[in-house]
Image: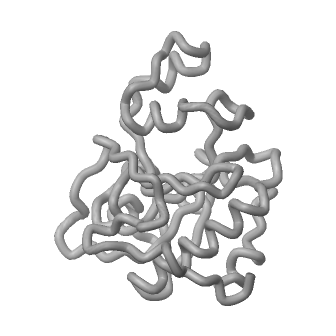
Amino acid sequence: MHGADSTGFALDAAGWCAAARRVPSPHHDARPAGAKVELVVIHNISLPPGEFGGPWIDELFLGRLDPRAHPYFEDIAAREVSSHFLIRRDGSLTQYVPCEARAWHAGVSSWKGVSRCNDFSIGIELEGADDVPFAEPQYETLARLARALFDRYGTLDLAGHSDIAPGRKTDPGLWFEWDRVRAAL
């Protein structure tokens, strides 16, 4: 998918993507004064772990995850987390936080010696797990979204959650095809 087309993925003034289903999360705030978007952080997520589909990711990012719905949820339901985007296995795109705002996806993190990656990054979650290959439609959507982000912010660094929080995070995992994504841009 060399030269990924970003048609339809344009961002409005606040940074909402036209191609995304919009599900505003309360888990965000303003970027610090003068902060410039410089980084895209790739994550993976599945709730419960290893299970795809269902409403649970939305519920987590909206602060409405029922801790009684699954034993795994008991430990994470109260967390205030979000991401800018989620790309489902079928390639569908959901946006929780506008790109001009700071989503709470990176946690304790550092990139090129600068801490607090949430301040200067866009978080993209891929529905998946460290030990499962990602689906073709996810790569297609990711390439189009990344091209739209580059169109808006200029060339951005790409990193995995594991790169900005080594020893603490492992996603997007060994199955993520970095070379394929870079070639598409």
Q: Nearer the viewer, residue 92 or 49?
A: 92
Q: How is the image coloured?
A: one colour
- Say if 161 sits above or below 81 in the image: below
Pinpoint residue 135: horizontal percent, then vertical percent: 78, 56
Q: Nearer the viewer, residue 110 or 145?
A: 145
- Say if 17 sits above or below 157 in the image: above
- Report if residue 166 is visible in the image: no
Name the residue: 45% across, 24% down.
Answer: 65
From the image, which quarter does the N terminus lie in?
A: bottom right
Query: Which residue reaches farthest top?
Result: 68
From the image, which quarter does the C terminus lie in?
A: bottom right
Compared across the picture, whether 181 is left or right of 116 comes to: right
- Report if residue 122 is visible in the image: yes
Name the residue: 49% across, 75% down.
Answer: 8
Pinpoint residue 99: horizontal percent, then vertical percent: 35, 65
- The answer to which image quadrant residue 159 occupies is bottom right
Name the residue: 33% across, 60% down.
Answer: 98
Query: Which residue reaches farthest left?
Result: 33
Query: How many numbered marks have been drawn onto this rendered protein structure?
Result: 0
Pinpoint residue 33: horizontal percent, then vertical percent: 17, 70
Compared across the picture, whether 36 is left or right of 75 comes to: left
Pinpoint residue 27: horizontal percent, then vertical percent: 32, 42
